Amino acid sequence: MAPLHSGMLLVAAPELQDPNFEQSVVLLLDADDEGALGVILNRPSPVLVADVLEGWRDLAVEPDVLFQGGPVSVDGALALARPTDPETPPVGFREVVDGLGVLDLDTPVELVADGLAGLRVFVGYAGWGPGQLEDEVAEGSWYVVPGHIGDVFALDPAELRRDVLRRQPGSLAWVSTRPVDPSQN
């Protein structure tokens, strides 16, 4: 197995029955010997960004709701953002991969508003201890595939898992058509 790194997607295999991750697509934000962390990209909540973080309402891309990023630290939020000019990112921005990064939500909005092309806010995150994620991948719980910046800002998060699998080469594309409940096949 190739080493896991920032920017990869973890797509839940049909056999993964953990309700926290069933049918999920996770963007890895960090992976090293100390563990891994990421956010679930396809779990929009019904809560509008404007209802919780009023100042960020105009920068949040559609759907402009909070996303359930994972089961860890659900009392906090983090934002993934894309700067308008990756060569001069705004204050409070830390690049993760290819012009996509984490934006500190404590940064005054007026300091970053003109420098962002898109923003999505996640409540909580997904985290794994040392070796835990590698073990889950080895047992077949996750498909590890390349991510695209557009995955983070997908207009239809409900279709993201299918779309990500469909663009993969070989037999993995076929998994995109597999029903959630194999008895429905």
Image (cartoon, grey):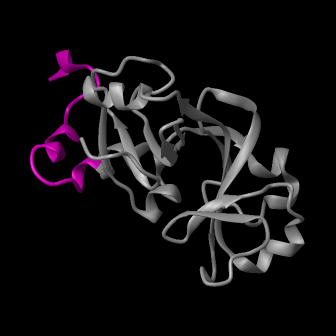
Q: Residue 121, relative to residue 12: is it above or below?
A: below
Q: Residue 31, relative to residue 136: is it above or below?
A: below
- Horizontal placement of 102 versus 48: left or right? left
Instruction: Where is residue 126? Give x, y as percent.
Output: 56, 33
Identified at 43% across, 25% down, the residue is 132
Quadrant for the C terminus in the image: top left
Instruction: Where is residue 100? Give x, y as percent.
Output: 56, 65
Magenta residues span: 165-185
Instruction: Where is residue 75? Give x, y as percent.
Output: 78, 31
182 is within the stretch colored magenta:
yes
Q: Is residue 155 visible?
A: no
Instruction: Where is residue 159? Give x, y as percent.
Output: 39, 46
Q: Nearer the viewer, residue 91 or 159?
A: 91
Quadrant for the N terminus in the image: top left
Please identify the quarter of the rendering in which residue 58 is found.
bottom right
Please identify the quarter of the rendering in which residue 82 is found.
bottom right
- Horizontal placement of 96 versus 75: left or right? left
29 is within the stretch colored magenta:
no
- Horizontal placement of 134 versus 60: left or right? left
Please identify the quarter of the rendering in which residue 172 is found.
top left
Q: Nearer the viewer, residue 8 or 151?
A: 8
Kindly give the residue lying farthest to the left in the view shown: 170
Q: Nearer the viewer, residue 185 or 4?
A: 4
- Horizontal placement of 12 versus 65: left or right? left
